Image (cartoon, helix red, strand yellow):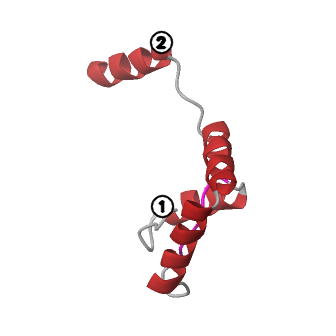
Amino acid sequence: VVLPIYGTHQEENARLFAGHNGAVLIEKGTDTGHKLAQVVKDLIEHETKRKNLGCRLHELLPRAKPERIVEIIEALLEQ
């Protein structure tokens, strides 16, 4: 469940994940606390939905290889 900060890049990211079935987006202004509660309750009650969201999100954001993490850190240290 994603509640992005309105007016930031988080909205675009959240829409991307939700559009690819990797997250449930709660939007400011159109959704309510009641909707958030309904979404959370639904996910608690439906294990398959939770697992499917997790699998899709993992596909959208695969884990970085340890070598790549080291490369990124080294590049940042050189700056």
Tell me where residue 63 appears, x and y as whole percent: 54, 28
75 is higher (above) or lower (below) than 6:
above
State whether the magenta stretch is mostly helix, strand or loop: loop
Tell me where residue 12 appears, x and y as whole percent: 57, 62
Crowd tier of the residue under label 2, counting other residues whose Cα lies within 10 Å: few below 14, some 14–19, many 20 or above? few
Residue corresponding to mark 2? 67
Is 74 positioned to the left or the right of 51 in the image? left
Name the residue at the right extreme: 20
**Magenta stretch bounds:** 22-27
74 is higher (above) or lower (below) than 55:
above
78 is higher (above) or lower (below) than 35:
above
Residue corresponding to mark 1? 10
Name the kind of residue labelled 2 in the image. Answer: Glu
Q: Is residue 53 visible?
A: yes
Q: Residue at x 43, y 21 (%)?
A: 69
Q: Is residue 32 visible?
A: no
Tell me where residue 72 appears, x and y as whole percent: 41, 22
Q: Label 2 to label 1, Cα distance in Å?
A: 27 Å
Name the residue at the front extreme: 45
